[in-house]
Amino acid sequence: MRKKSQKRLFDNIFWYIIYLLPILAMGIFLAKNGAVDFSIINCFESLGISIFSDNIIYITMISIFGVGGVFPIFADGAYGLLMFASYYVCCFFVHMIVDVLLLLPRLVMNFNDKVGGED
């Protein structure tokens, strides 16, 4: 396996673990406590990432897919999936920003090599 393939594999594994962190934590909480009424919203609150209940992405999803929304497909108590979706979208934005920030030094080094020449 080439070095570039290994880096990409570890990068993908890292980001998918972050994407699925609430689901993994929910599985751990359920295995530890055995609580049947434990939901995704309770998992977010237990992890301390309940900020996703009042961000603009979550509010927009509720206004579209919620009870009084344009395309109401979720009941009043089933907003855990929308909270996880807003978490996923926020993580995806962070992933894009990190990728751009890591791309900039590589571009500058390539430009420097082309302009300055290699020694």
Image: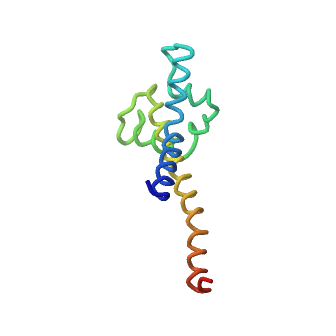
Numbered circles on residues, count: 0
Q: Along the horizontal axis of the image, is 82 left or right of 29?
A: left
Furthest residue toward right: 48
**Nearest to the observer: residue 10 or residue 17:** 10
The image quadrant of residue 70 is top left
**Nearest to the observer: residue 88 or residue 64:** 88
Q: Quadrant of the C terminus?
A: bottom right
103 over 43 or under it: above or below: below
The image shows residue 71 at horizontal and vertical percentages of 35, 40
The image quadrant of residue 78 is top left
The image quadrant of residue 52 is top right
96 over 34 or under it: above or below: below
Residue at 44%, 33% (x, y): give it. Answer: 81
**Nearest to the observer: residue 9 or residue 22:** 9
Q: Along the horizontal axis of the image, is 73 left or right of 62?
A: left
Q: Along the horizontal axis of the image, is 50 left or right of 78?
A: right
The image shows residue 1 at horizontal and vertical percentages of 43, 53
Q: Along the horizontal axis of the image, is 44 left or right of 73?
A: right
**Nearest to the observer: residue 69 or residue 104:** 104
The image shows residue 77 at horizontal and vertical percentages of 46, 25
Residue at 53%, 47% (x, y): give it. Answer: 90
Residue at 53%, 28% (x, y): give it. Answer: 41
The image shows residue 11 at horizontal and vertical percentages of 51, 50
Residue at 49%, 57% (x, y): give it. Answer: 3
